[in-house]
Image (tube, rainbow, N blue to C red):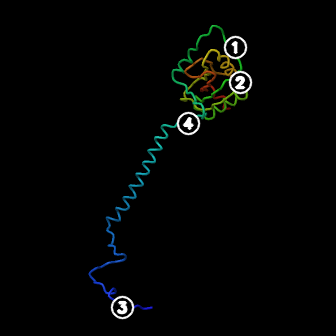
Amino acid sequence: MKYPKDRFDDFPSSLNRRGAHRAPRTRLSKIGSWLIALASVVLLVGIGVGVMWMIDRQVQFSGSMGDPTPTPTETAQESSETPTPTPEAPVATFDAQIAVSVLNGAGLGGLATAGSGVLEGEGWNVQVIDDADHSNYESTTVAVNSEADLGAALAVVEALGFGEAIVDPAQASPGELIVILGADAAGLLN
């Protein structure tokens, strides 16, 4: 259907309007849109990386979610060279109630798991399997908190077939036994 011509059909030719009365975009406005989008992406990625970095520095994962895993210190290694003298030699005694933590101190993959398998096979209560604070332990140490638990540490040394039992309250909590497998425990992986 054709409509009759009216006054709105005639408009001045000097207006040069196109579309919805928008002027064409300049090159600067087109580039500006892309630069704003690029800056937004860079800013969001930077914020995400910063947040992940902060979370990574603050969150510490351990083998046991309920109890913090004690990590041996350098002074503990020095004290293993001079064990505490005892008036009478303690006797190796099996204690299934004592909590055992097996730590890989040699940096060999699967060493703590192999050591815990040996101890669990002997009936020990292994609760934590993890890595030690560093991986340059030469010899295996079994640390307990007090002289009263030294018999259990000696029994673990006998079960493993190597290592040294020490009393180190800085390393082990009461009722806990810490086994740090050193390079001498590499035979467990065979």
Q: Which mark is residue 91?
A: 1
Q: Nearer the viewer, mark 3 or mark 2?
A: 3
Q: Secondary structure at mark 1?
A: loop
Estimate the spatial distance between the alpha carbons at disc 3 and disc 4, rounded to whole Å: 81 Å
Circles 1 and 4: CB distance less than 8 Å?
A: no
Relative to 85, say whether 165 is above or below.
below
Packing grade of label 2 (10 A; few <14, some 14-19, many >=20) is some
Q: CA distance from mark 3 to mark 1?
A: 117 Å
Q: Position of residue 176 (x, y in %)?
A: 63, 23
According to the picture, the residue beneath numbered tag 3 turns out to be 5
Vertical side of 116 occupied by 91: above or below: above
Residue 145 position, x and y percent, is: 60, 19
Callout 1 amino acid: Val
Please, what secondary structure does the residue beneath circle 3 have? Answer: loop
Quarter occupied by residue 151 = top right
- Counting from the top left corner in percent of width and height, residue 19 is at 37, 77
Q: Of the numbered discs in the image, which one, if any, rests on residue 61? A: 4
Q: Amino acid at mark 4?
A: Phe
How many numbered discs sit on the rendered protein? 4
Return the disc, 1 or 2, that comes first in the chain's sequence: 1
Q: Earlier in the sequence, mark 4 or mark 2?
A: 4
Task: Name the residue: 31% across, 64% down.
Answer: 28
